[in-house]
């Protein structure tokens, strides 16, 4: 299964009632990131495509899991400390709707009430993430047959 590689084991991560499908944020949702920082986060995340996946990994040399990748990119390019677990990322920042998501925002996935995975939105329906054991950081489409079937929420740091 793809999503078990994140730093937090899915069975213990419950999505709050407001986590999926109830986003009320709009384009005017405040961000701790300037437009330049959001672009830098995006470019840097894309530059890490191909880095090996490693459960618990949080540096390019050690490899990344999904939350380790997010924490590293935001720390290095925006000076923000992101939560280390995928379960905590669902509450980091402010919720935004799919129609107002922009580069540098987070996309958090779940199944039922479980938070299972997260990545960084890079525009044009794409996101960068560290998906699975034995894999590597990659760029995927939210509209792909796999990801489009997942519950997703967007967060703006």
Image (spheres, helix red, strand yellow):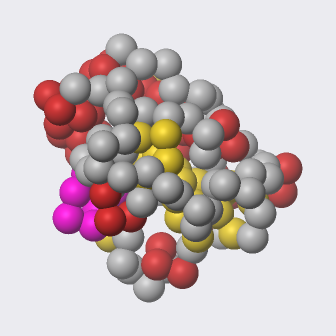
Residue 153 falls left or right of residue 4 = left
Q: Residue at 49%, 40% (x, y): give it.
A: 94
> In terms of image quadrants, where is residue 89?
top right
Secondary structure mostly seen in magenta is strand
Number of numbered discs overlaid on the protein picture? 0
Residue 18's spot in the image, x, y percent? 66, 55
Is residue 72 visible to the viewer in this orientation of the structure? yes
* Nearest to the observer: residue 59 or residue 74: 74
Q: Of all residues shown, which one is farthest toward the right?
A: 12
Q: Position of residue 72 (x, y in %)?
A: 42, 26
Residue 157 sits inside the magenta stretch: no
16 left or right of 31 in image? right
Across and down, in percent, residue 45 comes to 29, 40
Asked whether residue 15 appears in the rendered view, the answer is no
- Residue 122 drawn above or below residue 147: above
- Residues in magenta, as a range: 120-129
Q: Nearer the viewer, residue 70 or 64?
A: 70
Q: Quick one: quadrant of the C terminus?
A: top left
State left or right for residue 84 relative to residue 71: right
Position of residue 34 measured from the top left corner of the image (x, y, whole percent): 22, 26
**122 magenta-colored:** yes
Quadrant in the picture for residue 60:
top left
Q: Give above or below for 6 relative to 43.
A: below
Q: Residue at x 38, y 70 (%)?
A: 142
């Amino acid at each position: 299964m793809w999503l078990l590689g994140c730093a937090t084991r899915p069975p213990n991560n419950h999505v709050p009632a407001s986590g999926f499908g109830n986003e009320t944020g709009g384009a005017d949702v405040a961000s701790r990131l300037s437009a330049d920082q959001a672009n830098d986060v995006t470019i840097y995340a894309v530059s890490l495509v191909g880095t090996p996946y490693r459960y618990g990994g949080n540096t390019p040399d050690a490899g990344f899991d999904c939350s380790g990748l997010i924490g590293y990119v935001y720390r290095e390019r925006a000076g923000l400390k992101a939560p280390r677990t995928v379960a905590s990322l669902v509450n980091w920042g402010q919720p935004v709707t799919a129609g107002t998501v922009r580069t540098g925002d987070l996309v958090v996935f779940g199944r039922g009430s479980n938070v299972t995975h997260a990545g960084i939105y890079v525009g044009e329906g794409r996101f960068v993430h560290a998906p699975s054991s034995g894999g590597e950081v990659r760029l995927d489409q939210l509209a792909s047959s796999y990801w489009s079937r997942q519950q997703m929420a967007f967060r703006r740091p």
